[in-house]
């Protein structure tokens, strides 16, 4: 008899199951997570002040914007008193060769200086008039920071007149990618010599003697 009672009691305990709805389960999970969430936001206790939470977020946002503004201002380079990156300049951008005879060559020099903190490459030198040409140095060539190069510009006129032109130096300089040198000159024809009279007669002259022909 006692054994039968113990079996029935065991069956009642095993069948004593509670029905838990989804809403109750979610509420139980929120109660379990609530202490963690309040610790994350720095709000402990049952009384959560929404205005205090907003003040915390607003202060954090303002601080973040201030840091971004400071970093942005430091990243902007100052242009006052600084040389543009990669700038090169010529001592003279207007070269006059004066008078030259047709077919002859006259050469002048100019100085090109790299006034930046970067290495600059001069890739080519193009002339708009074949009478003018940059003969030295050969392109391409490079200029280290602060380095100067002597440019040899030649004038070889082909016809008479007053030719003009432009020599353009191309480079990878960001401040002055191309430098134009204006060139000009005066070309004249070569002079001619003439002998008059075309023949001279000295008459009879003894061997070993000299005779001067008087001027006419």
Image: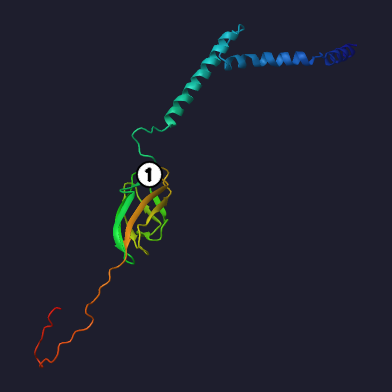
Instruction: Point out the image quarter for the N terminus.
Output: top right
Left or right: where 149 falls relative to 68: left
Total marks in image:
1
Where residue 46 appears, as percent x and y from the top left, is: 62, 7
Front one among 142 and 168: 168
According to the picture, the residue beneath numbered tag 1 turns out to be: 87
**Residue 84, image x, y percentages:** 38, 40
- Residue at the spot 76% in from the left edge and 13% down from the top edge: 24
The answer to which of 19 and 21 lies nearer the viewer is 21
Say which quarter of the image contains residue 162.
bottom left
**Which residue sits at x=64%, y=14%?**
34
Tell me if 207 is positioned left or right of 138 in this view. Answer: left
Q: Where is residue 40 shown, x and y percent of the image? A: 58, 17
Residue most extreme to the top: 47
Residue under the point 57% across and 12% down: 54
Where the C terminus falls, by quadrant?
bottom left
Please give left or right for residue 170 compared with residue 2 in the image.
Answer: left
Name, please, the residue furthest toward the front: 216
Of helix, strand and loop, which one carries label 1? loop
């Amino acid at each position: 008899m006692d054994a039968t009672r113990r079996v029935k009691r065991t069956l009642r305990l095993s069948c004593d199951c509670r029905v838990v709805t989804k809403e109750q389960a979610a509420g139980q999970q929120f109660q379990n997570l609530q202490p963690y969430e309040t610790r994350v936001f720095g709000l402990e206790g049952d009384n959560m002040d929404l205005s205090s939470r907003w003040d915390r977020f607003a202060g954090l946002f303002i601080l973040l914007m201030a840091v971004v503004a400071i970093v942005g201002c430091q990243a902007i380079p100052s242009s006052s008193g600084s040389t543009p990156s990669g700038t090169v300049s010529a001592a003279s951008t207007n070269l006059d060769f004066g008078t030259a005879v047709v077919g002859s060559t006259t050469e002048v020099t100019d100085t090109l200086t790299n006034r930046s903190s970067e290495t600059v490459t001069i890739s080519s030198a193009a002339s708009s008039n074949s009478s003018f040409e940059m003969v030295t140095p050969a392109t391409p060539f490079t200029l280290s920071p602060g380095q100067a190069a002597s440019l040899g510009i030649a004038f070889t006129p082909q016809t008479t007149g007053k030719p003009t032109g432009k020599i353009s130096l191309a480079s990878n300089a960001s401040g002055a990618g191309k430098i134009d040198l204006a060139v000009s000159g005066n070309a004249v024809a070569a002079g001619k010599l003439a002998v008059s009279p075309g023949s001279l007669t000295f008459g009879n002259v003894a061997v070993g003697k000299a005779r001067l022909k008087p001027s006419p």
